[in-house]
Image (cartoon, grey):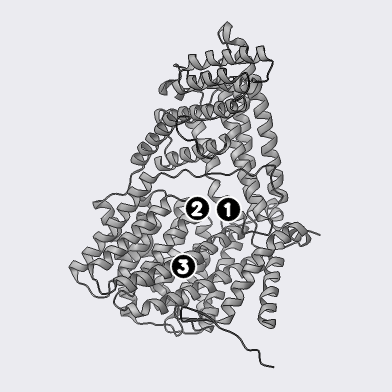
Amino acid sequence: MTNTYRELVIGGVLIAPIVSYAAIALVAFLMLRPLLRIVGFARIFSNPSLAELCFYVALFGMLALFF
Amino acid sequence: MRVNVTSAAALRPTVFAGFPASSWAFALRVWMAMMLALYVGFWLELESPSSAALTVAVLALPTRGQGMEKAGYRLLATVIGVIASIAIAGMFSQTGGLLLAVLGIWIGLCTYVASMLDGNRAYAVALCSITVALIAVEQIDTPLQVFPTGVARGAAIGIGVLAVAFVNEVLAAPSYHPVLASRIEALHRRVMNLVQDAERGETPSAAVAAGLLHDIAAVRPEIVSLTTESSIGTARTAAARSALVDLVSAFSVGRMLSALPTAPARDAAGLMAMSRSWLRTQIRQKDAQVRGSLDALRQGTPPYRAWRAPLYRSRRIAAETGVRAAISFALIAIVFVLTGWPATELCLALVAVIISLGSISPAPRGFTMVAVMAMPIASILAGVLKYLVFNGVSEFQLLAIGLAPVVIGLALLISLPSPMPSSLGRLVLVFTLAVLAPTNPQSYDPEVFLVTALFACLSSVLVFAAQMLLPPLSGDRRVVLLLGEIRRELGGLGRGRARDLAPEEAAFRDAVRIEQVLTAHGPSALDDQTAGEAMRCFDQAEALRRCHAELDQVRQGPLTTAAQAARAALAGRNGGAILAAAEALRQAAARSELPANAAIAALVAASVAFAPSRSPTAASQGTRP
């Protein structure tokens, strides 16, 4: 199965799909941060920042896979 | 089990070749991130992979949060700078002198805004003008290349940021909040020692007090980086901010307590005792609040109250700095136009870089001196690397090995606590990479290297010469301007429209202004007269604001008339009249059996602050440690 990527076009400039996925994942991650704080995400892991990076990579990967 | 990497390292500091293990770890992280950025840059066949390496050098900060915060601002500033470059190149291309004038105005405007901000925000604004310089100025003769150059620079910076973030996360770069918490704790101890001295009737000299305020306010730009550190970073930032604001508040209450006379006149003894008791309660309360905020900072929970920590912005100083930056750039551009040398775009771009970076440093002239020293060192290092170490090789592994001693050595220099070698190390690292310009395949053209190295050195010398012709705003002039603004604001306090700030927040803003006075004054100790003047205004403004805040509480009801009389006495700035108003308020409160102790106590403290004996010379007297 070949995934068809839709390119973002801003003022005639084509933006590579990977850039838009990275940006959307970043926005989604920032919006989820308050939720992570409420559930105590940082307290579960010994290296919380690495866990957060992994969470971002997972979000980014899912976006690239399913959209 | 949760492992705290930083605390484990802090227990057993290992020193190797004169540098602690944490500095070596930092230097290794910088080298690894730089190599990762270069490798990915080569792999993606970016047009300017050296920009990715430069980004790593710029973002080389010892803790994760600081690096991430700067990275965010760097990305944002690059986007704004690229848009501005396209707009400037689109509108003013082929206009000759007008284009250079517009570039000068842009640099001046960015310098103006940067002077109104602090920390990495100021850096971001300076980077907006640097980006324009590196894109629009370098492509001054080929405006059609502005957009591709901007995209290439954006991509390279993105790669650099990702490399730094990845290496810092995977190698567990230390968090910043333990460092910040211990710094605030040390400041808390100093403030409490000062308060205990005040209880004993000892008053520290104005210079010592101003120094403590400087140290508290100097933490302000660094607390924002906690936000980017983790998902609970926002709460930590709020907690650190509250702790700082409460520290300044405790400090100011301590000053009020120490100013109260130990042997007052018999008719004022009751009022003085009341004021003393209220001030002690306030200090205990502030002490508990600082402790609570410090606990919240460590645990990552929101503080009891999220104070704002406003920054003082001097429009006059910002405008003068901006105008001087614009004129310096224009002068150097005119020199290039008059000489008619070819290929001077790089030199002009570097001039803009040095002017912009210098404008956000506390001493622009000192920064230019460091740049003048750094450029030849960087050129020699790049030359040695290019023609003695690499000398024709093109394998990435050899590039990584060859760069290792230089990058690690300079990163060790950056990690030093002293600002001068640290700043020199960063500039040498950045300019070595800029002159070396690693590309795939590597260019070994000696002519290109010589021209680049010559222009790099020339740019710093030209900025230095321009600053000789038009000196940047001197520290003394800044101090005079700031003191004038302090006096003017104190004169208008309580008369015009009040700012939307709580007394605690306004006191912090005043502390930031004193920090700016001390920073402008330079490393030498502040003279007693200036320090005394600054601290006297700080004490009086704080007393006035507290009185107004407490009088607002008794604004309505039977105490209205007495409160209005007290306000009139405050407007007169007369210590005796304020004390009389406090006595009248006490009698009115006793008659109507209403609590007004806080307002009375604040008025008594204000009466002492405005007593005729608190002249500028008397206020600077005190004990020195």
For mark 3, give the secondary structure.
helix
Tell us which disc is closer to us: 2 or 3.
3
Badge 3 density bin: few <14, some 14–19, many ≥20, Cα 10 Å: many
Gap between marks 2 and 1, in whole Å? 9 Å
For mark 1, give the secondary structure.
helix
* Badge 1: chain ID: B
Which kind of residue does numbered mark 3 sit on?
Answer: Thr
Q: Are marks 2 and 3 on the same chain?
A: yes
Gap between marks 2 and 3, in whole Å? 17 Å
| Marks 1 and 3, the one that precedes in the sequence | 3
Identity of the residue drawn at 69% across and 15% down: B593
Residue occupying the far front of the picture: B557
- Comparing B451 with B301, the one in front is B301
| Numbered tag placed on residue B78 in the rendering | 3
Identity of the residue drawn at 63% across and 26% down: B196
Which kind of residue does numbered mark 1 sit on?
Answer: Val
| Marks 2 and 1, the one that precedes in the sequence | 2
State how many labels appear.
3
Where residue B311 appears, as percent x and y from the top left, is: 50, 45
Q: Is residue B590 left or right of residue A13?
A: right
Which kind of residue does numbered mark 2 sit on?
Answer: Gly
**Against B252, is B266 above or below?**
above
Residue B253 visible in this rendered orientation of the protein: yes
Gap between marks 1 and 3, in whole Å? 20 Å
Say if mark 2 contacts mark 1, CB within 8 Å.
yes
Residue occupying the far left of the picture: B338
Q: Are marks 2 and 1 on the same chain?
A: yes
Where residue B405 appears, as percent x and y from the top left, is: 51, 69
Where residue B94 appears, as percent x and y from the top left, is: 25, 74
Q: Which residue is mark 2?
A: B119
* Badge 3: chain ID: B
Q: Which residue is mark 1?
A: B224
